[in-house]
Image (cartoon, rainbow, N blue to C red):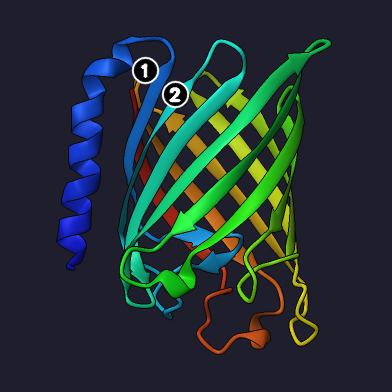
Amino acid sequence: MKISHYVGVALGCLALSLPLVSSAEWSANLGVVSLYKDRGVDQEGRDDAIRPALQGGLDYAFDNGLYVGNWNSTGQFGNAGMEVDLYAGYRLGFAQDWLFDVGYVHYIYPGDASWNAGEIYASLGYQRLTFKVYRGVREEINKNDMYYRLTYTHPLMERLNLTAGVGYQDFDAADLRGKFDYSIGLDYALNESVSLSGTIAGANRKNDVVDHSRDTRFILGLTAAF
């Protein structure tokens, strides 16, 4: 199936759901980025600094702290033309300005099931600082792989935030070396719903891959939240 079909499915699901967003429990987002880069790695694995991707998702939060959600991105992942993430978890605020979050996310690549994988995760946040841990669960794909991420957001002025993060990926496979990744960027709210971002991101040990996917990139993004 072509990428255009997946884009249509994702947009259709979001469009059908938007009337429900008026309820406080629902939230949705839709945006575009100049490059889909995650954990310091270009997700398409090509030596291109610009490969635009359409992205969007829908979330529902229950009053008791439970939540479910979906996030999607176009791209080229093996023989798949789209990534579909399904997740569920539990959030708990405690003390003052503390937030605990635990859950599971399943990654689906329609058309190429060999890429499918899942992770359990947990995070602890205090005010604008968050530490999050992921553990892979699929045999022969990412089982026992660990990923650690520390993120800090700092308001520079009204509507403008600085976000910086560093992560570490520890692979369970003996022939793969762990890697650090980094990102720093600015996010500017154009209005109550739309924001523009610019981020520099990459990873170390660039010579461990031959596709330049860990190279440092500058990524532009435009996102609308509903």
Tell me: residue 8, above or below residue 49. above
Tell me: residue 22, above or below residue 90. above
Amino acid type, label 2: Tyr
Query: Which residue, given by chain and number where applicable, does mark 2 sit on?
Result: 60
Looking at the rendered structure, the secondary structure element under dot 2 is strand
> What label does residue 192 carry, if any?
1
Amino acid type, label 1: Glu
The extreme front residue here reads: 139
**Left of 164 or right of it: where is 198?**
left
Residue beneath the point at 49% across and 36% down: 187
Between 92 and 180, the one lying in front of the other is 92
Q: Quadrant of the C terminus?
A: top left
Which of labels 2 and 1 is toward the front? Answer: 2
Quadrant of the rendered image containing residue 65: top right
**Left of 180 or right of it: where is 42?**
left
Q: Position of residue 34 (x, y in %)?
A: 35, 57
Instruction: Classify 10 Å Cα crowding around label 2: few (below 14), some (14-19), many (20 and above).
Output: some
Q: Position of residue 7 (x, y in %)?
A: 21, 52
Residue beneath the point at 49% across and 61% down: 37
How far apart are the two marked residues, 2 and 1, measured between alpha carbons? 20 Å
Between 88 and 198, the one lying in front of the other is 88
